[in-house]
Image (cartoon, rainbow, N blue to C red):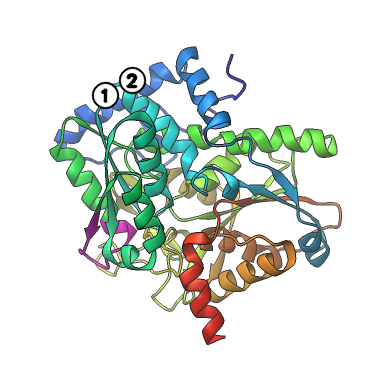
Amino acid sequence: MCNYSFENLLPVDENGYYGEFGGSYIPEPLKVRLEEVNKAFRHYINDMEFLNEFEDLLHNYAGRPSPLFLAKKLSERYGAQIYLKREDLNHTGAHKINNALGLGLLAKRMGKRKIIAETGAGQHGVAAATVAALLDLECVVYMGAEDVARQQPNVMRMKMLGAKVMPVDAGNATLNNAVDAALSAWVADEEAFYLIGSAVGPHPFPEIVARFQSVISFEVKKQLEKLIGRNNPDYVIASIGGGSNAAGAFYHFINDERVKLVAVEAAGKGVGTGESAASITEGQTGVLHGSRTKVLANADGSVKEAYSISAGLDYPGIGPLQSYLAENGRTQVLVADDKEALDAAFLLAEEEGIIPALESSHALAALKKIKFEADDIVVVNLSGRGDKDMGTYMKYMIED
């Protein structure tokens, strides 16, 4: 019997709406494909054989459960009990492997032989390529040309794993444009399966990703119970770009009002500078990649290019779940700019011996923005490791 719980705890209706957000705003050719995915997911999320295979891979391939580590120096610095959920220790180095394994198994059950994926920082691309190699699937990953240049280690990993990496030159050549290209490729290839990387896009993708990533918060509850005798922290903090690591970290606490949920957006060069990725803080309601959500937009309503030093947060929108939670006050939304994220990364490295991904560094940067009580239990989702960002970190060290 599967030991994880994948029950639906999301505030979502049968059409994929989280309040006014979500839904499926897609061209006609995609509707049949999405219904096929939705039907398969509804069946297999309740199929014990599927769930047992998924759990086996989570444990014996991905390395779950990921540790919950008490960061004693950070705890002393910020005046609370700071725990790090070590998703950086997963196989492939981030939380992305959770969702990639679930969707890869779903693709296999559906008889697909090829997966299409998009990636920004490259962590999802690596996870998709890894799962494709494991399950004997062809893999094509679309990646903005700008991200290809700044995430070369992950590009090389994808290629070594047998994936074909397709650079995208459109727009500002980052994650938004990679998603566009991947969706277009999926429309054109009926034999392919879209292994989406975040809790974005048309229904049912945001729900599927959140439920597969829910293993994070499920483990946190179990681990806290063992460590401190209670399963509810006072705070859970996660960065949000598309929203997958936050969806997983928040999932089993969404309906527990005792737990404060803190979502941290990438402010890039600063809120109000025109160069940020803070789509909740600075955006407006619109449609992006088939979903109604909060989007960075120009005066004419067109989607605005986002900017962040973090390739994984450099996205002009957010998943509908995160829009809903913020709109209804369930999450506290904070921002961290590039320098704050870099400073937080170096602090963690120097004080705890852990080099985080730039995405995770935004969540760490929020610690100094919150006034904690000494007995507060705080969980920060350390969504990925920093190997891929060493080029950026080295540049910062030279310039500093």
Q: Which residues fall within the magenta stretch?
A: 166-177
**Does residue 369 appear anywhere in the picture?**
no
Which residue is at a point 36% across and 32% down the rendered structure image? 204
Of residues 51 and 255, the one drawn nearer to the viewer in this rendering: 51
Q: Nearer the viewer, mark 1 or mark 2?
A: 2
Q: Which residue is mark 1?
A: 36
Residue 329 location (% of width, % of height): 58, 50
On whether residue 13 falls in the magenta region, the answer is no
Q: Is tag 1's residue or tag 2's residue first in the polypeptide sequence?
A: 1
Near mark 1 (Cα within 10 A), the count class, few <14, some 14-19 or many ≥20, is few
Which residue is at a point 41% across and 62% down the rendered structure image? 311
Of residues 140 and 48, the one drawn nearer to the viewer in this rendering: 140
Q: Which residue is mark 2?
A: 109
Residue 348 location (% of width, % of height): 68, 65
Numbered badge on residue 165: none
Q: Secondary structure at mark 2?
A: helix
The N terminus - image quarter: top right
Residue type marked 1: Glu
